[in-house]
Amino acid sequence: MDYNQQRVQRDDLHLLTQHSNLSTTIVEEVLTRDVYAKRSDWQKLLQIMTLTLGVGFTVTGIIFFFAYNWQDLHKFVKLGIISTLLIASIVITLIPFKDWIKHIVITGASMLVGALFAVFGQIYQTGANAYDFFLVWSLFITIWVFVSYFPPLTLLYVALLNTTIILYEAQVASGWTTENLFFVLCLLNSIVFAGVQLFQHVNHPLWFVQILALSIVIYATIGTCSGINNFDSSPSSILIFILTSILHTAGIYYSLKIKKVQYLAMIGCSILIILSTLFLQLSDGEMMFFFLFVQNAAGIAMLVSLLISLQKKWSNENK
Amino acid sequence: MRTNETLESLLKQVPTDKQPSFVYDRDALQLAFTQNRESHHLTTKVLSVFGGLLTSLFFLGFIFISGIYESALATFILGILLLGGSLWFSQFSIKPYLDTLCVCAFIVGLSLINVSMFERELPTNVHLSILLLTSLLSLVFARNYILSFLSLVAVNGTLLAFTLENDLTYGIYIHLVVLAFMLYFISSNEARIITKHPILSKLYSPIRTSLLFCFLIGLIFIRLQSEHMENFYYKWATSWIFIGLILVQIPFLFKLLGIEQTGKKWIIYSLTTVLLLTTSIYPPITGALFILLLSFRFKHTSGMVISIISFVYFISQFYYDLYFNLLNKSLLLMGSGVLFLVIFIYINKKWMRYEK
């Protein structure tokens, strides 16, 4: 039996004490043996804490030092410092270090690109719109993002693209309706999601894929609800309706295929919210609220029991 | 990855042979075990809470539009009925999909009781006392994770509201110190508490998480209070109590890490005290460090995550608020940073040598 097999989990132990007369000494022994932090855990914690605090404080101190003198620096020195850091970090990635070091350095370099453009804009007062800044930043780090598949960097890239679109709508495209905005955002993130899934051989961390999926569902839901509310004034909402239906159907099919419940949960909640908005359009009297209460309670109850039974079925299949 | 997929393998891991009088209720335990395995998934829990909030929203909307709230008595009675109903319902081992209704009834019931008292325009202290009493009663009778959690948060919220209403600006510090001692007591005596009574065992997790959450809210609350000079001593005292609670745990650490020489012990004690001294005027940092160490020592995972995030947040806030100019701040930061790096290199070298 390996170490993992021998451990008792805390909630199992609690269940045991609720239905037996287990003595305090045995419980204390099991807790100390299997649950509480051990010597190696403490060593790791102290090492990580001192290193993180040390590096964090020193780097912040250096940044503050430069910030203090920033006003007095000549503009070429300002640009020079950032450019040097940028070039240095790229050179580091070419040296054969371990992969995770290279990934972190490239992410740092991507942030420095943003800093470079920000300083450039500040010195020369180009008067560009904020969305220009994000657009240029995204464009310039595109190659790095594709070359080095590093989920946090990809997430940063997606966030930058999303910000570009949102700022574009706010500052330039006055003709866009809310639904159009969410349609474009949703479409963009879905393309990224599909693109990521195509790389089947690479291991995708769960949190990364789920954050992407969550953003898609949220955009689709808000867009559809907004479309329902403004249907008379903006007939182009039909676009977001179609997109949402396609995405939800695809999502359900995908979720059943890869046997993960999280996407079903998100899509289920989204459908309930959209239905509620639809019904609220018909009437917003007190009986409608009561009806919506019943609908949502029943909906969530059915969703939860469906997910539990699916989860049970799939974990039985795995055994 | 869960270990121990069956009840039998779980029982094998527990050294029950050391207790000749050991008996257990096989059916109840098997039922609880299977239910735990089925619904422990994070998605179902999040879904239940989300569903509870969503349904509460619509039910409250129904109540407000129908105008029932105009009669304070009717609202109050309805609130009590719903609250009582949800507490009564939580006594039984209910199906997971009914959790949503339970949470909804609880939230709506509590809100209605609150609203009815606003309608009657009671003096605030009386209003708060009734809320406090209701929350305490809910805490005593709740048998559900979420209900216990919410009741304790309600109790703490009412107490904080009391201090605000009666202008007791030092109240928050006393509140935090009491919470800190309660957290320490509960965390260190886990075995004794959960074996005392099955109900205590069931309520242990939600209450501990809830206390941690309320402690954190209290720390954030300090920032919102205006700066009163007379609170200076309270701040210092609170900070030093937290530091004391941290130092008290160090002997235990010495034993675990195998540090025996008295000379080394003194160095570590003084180094820790010096480091903590630099931030002692700001209770949130020492508070966050205290719950970080406590959660880590007893492997309370949600506690660890919350305390790390809050620690980073409070340190940033501290340096942001500091009235030094940028140059002095940068020197202070670099100095502390170098000190930490030195400690890291020393620890690393010492333990690498030990491993070899």
Image (tube, coloured by chain):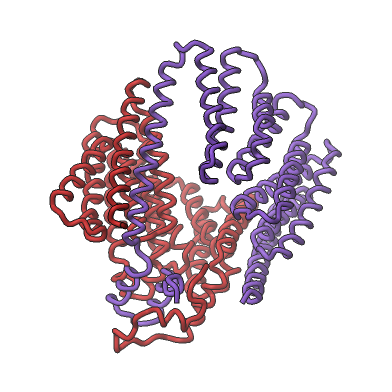
Chain colours: A purple, B red
Tell me if residue A197 comes above or below residue A89 in the rendering. Answer: below
Tell me if residue A165 comes above or below residue B183 in the rendering. Answer: above
Q: Would residue B282 be found to the left or right of residue A145 on screen? A: left
Q: Quadrant of residue B153?
A: bottom left
Taking the spot 40% from the left edge, 53% from the top edge, the residue there is: B304
Which is more toward the observer, B133 or A108?
A108
Q: Residue furthest left?
A: B262
Taking the spot 78% from the left edge, 37% from the top edge, the residue there is: A180
- Measured as percent of width and height from the top left, residue A265 is found at 66, 59
Taking the spot 68% from the left edge, 24% from the top edge, the residue there is: A132
- Measured as percent of width and height from the top left, residue A82 is found at 53, 23
Tell me if residue B250 comes above or below residue B170 in the rendering. Answer: below
The answer to whether one can see residue B314 in this image is: yes
Taking the spot 76% from the left edge, 26% from the top edge, the residue there is: A174
Which is more toward the observer, A105 or B333?
A105
- Measured as percent of width and height from the top left, residue A236 is found at 85, 39
The answer to whether one can see residue B126 in this image is: no
- Measured as percent of width and height from the top left, residue B90 is found at 49, 70
